Image: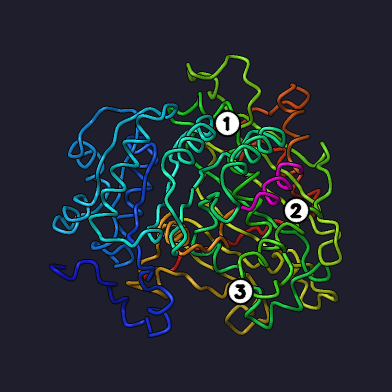
Amino acid sequence: MGSGQWMVEKRSGLENDSFLKEHETPSESGCLSIIVLGASGDLAKKKTFPALYHLYRQGFLHPDEVHIFGYARTRISDDELRDRIRGYLGKEAEVVSKFLQLIKYVSGSYDTEDGFQLLDKEISQHEVSKNSAEGSSRRLFYLALPPSVYPTVCRMIRKCCMNKSDNGGWTRIVIEKPFGKDLESAENLSAHIGELFEEAQLFRIDHYLGKELVQNLLVLRFANRFFLPLWNRDNISNVQIVFRENFGTEGRGGYFDEYGIIRDIIQNHLLQILCLVAMEKPVSLKPEYIRDEKVKVLQSVLPIRDEDVVLGQYEGYRDDPTVPDQSNTPTFATVVLRIHNERWEGVPFILKAGKALHSSKAEIRVQFKDVPGDIFKCQKQGRNEFVIRLQPSEAMYMKLTVKQPGLEMSTVQSELDLSYMQRYQGVPIPEAYERLILDTIRGDQQHFVRRDELKAAWEIFTPLLHRIDNGEMKPKEYQPGSRGPVEADELLAKAGYVQTHGYIWIPPTL
């Protein structure tokens, strides 16, 4: 790419001027410092730095104004950090090399001022070298750290690393989940960090909100006329939001056992998707209006009943030496939520997540009610469904009944299919972290979790989690590679889901 490596790449002729204007490099005058705390860890190596690299190579991080700082306790040099992350960045050696030269490493503790004072000194030197006007520089702190050190690190940033912001500059903090383990711990964390920073400075990241098809949900619902009259309890029987992995904890057993599948996946990722599926149309696309509507959904969710929950733990989970022999932690859960409002009264929202299952995928499945007066006698073939496949093989497809080609009047299930790999050939789908980091730089909080939203989410799940933690609810054992406990399928049927037999969606080939 030569001297123009930072310019936005042309995307298969599909872009236009309005797209470029919307996605151009942020235009603030002050230089930008991105500080990755926990820079020597796996999250930073596999997600944060690669996301920054892709933003750089597409022109969203201008080499003349941005500098990236890694901070961690590990004592390594700049070049050693660069070598650690080089293999995760890409194959364009010249571009990778120029990006890596933007990275400087600072070693220090997370609970003493000395390291943070040195970090502040390095950032300030960068700002001076770029001739930034006082008060115009921008500092983004990305906490790729365990939650246990958030309070201490945030206090150190506040005390040692804040910049003046009276001339358009800012300091912003990106916080990774988990945001606590229950309502009390989440509120304590929010209160502590809230004393140090304003809500507008805090970006609680849930990477599922950065996925392409999750971001498409509001467009689908509110920009297409034919969905508007259908999206309610009069037409929809049930909604499933599913996350499946075909592998177990894979060496993360000790960490996973502290949280379990509900805290790890359902209470955050799947619940955030539920909000976007169920929310009312916001006044506008301003982030606060969107987040207001999401909070209203969460506040309308009824308390979870024990009979609406099935827990599972795959056979062999406790063989991991880092997992307690008597662990009660679920690796699988199906939870039925019910929303008490005019639009969704009586429609079950089924959240389902599990590890060591028969396949890996994440999808939203909206199942419609039976057609009244079935003159074709085709109800047994299955109901209409609108499916949004989040990963892998991103797609949206509508399952519907059509006439079987031929001389006989027989029916068959088929689909209207929008598969991204086929429709948008050559158009790269951004990683969620790329999009969310760019949103942070722009100050757009639409796809981040607000404090009252976080509280409402924990209010829904904390009573259930405490019953599990206290041993009042036990997970059913299931075989690795299966669909999970058979009781989960029974709960689905009880909630009103009708499974389609004889139809399998196959991603179209190019």
In screen coordinates, is 1 left or right of 107? left
Query: Do the numbered discs 2 and 3 sit on residues whose CB atoms are within 8 Å?
Result: no
Residue picked out by circle 2: 298
Residue picked out by circle 3: 220
Q: Residues within 10 Å of mark 3 (few under 14, many from 20)?
A: some
In screen coordinates, is 138 left or right of 148? left
Q: Where is residue 240 shown, x and y percent of the image? A: 68, 55
Q: CA distance from mark 1 to mark 3?
A: 37 Å
Residue picked out by circle 1: 479
In screen coordinates, is 291 left or right of 446? right
Tell me which numbered mark, 2 or 3, is placed earlier along the sequence: 3
Instruction: Residue at 30% x, 28% y: name it.
Output: 74
Q: CA distance from mark 2 to mark 3?
A: 21 Å
The C terminus is located in which quarter? bottom left
Tell me which numbered mark, 2 or 1, is placed earlier along the sequence: 2
Instruction: Residue at 78% x, 62% y: name it.
Output: 237
Q: Give the prevailing secondary structure in the magenta stretch.
A: helix
Front residue (pair 494, 80): 80
Front residue (pair 193, 21): 193
- State which quadrant residue 117 falls in: top left
Tell me which numbered mark, 1 or 3, is placed earlier along the sequence: 3
Query: Bounds of the magenta span?
Result: 449-459
Front residue (pair 255, 78): 78
Secondary element type, mark 2: helix
Amino acid bearing label 3:
Leu
Amino acid bearing label 1:
Gln
Q: CA distance from mark 2 to mark 1?
A: 34 Å
Query: Do the numbered discs 2 and 1 sit on residues whose CB atoms are within 8 Å?
Result: no
Q: Nearer the viewer, mark 2 or mark 3?
A: 2
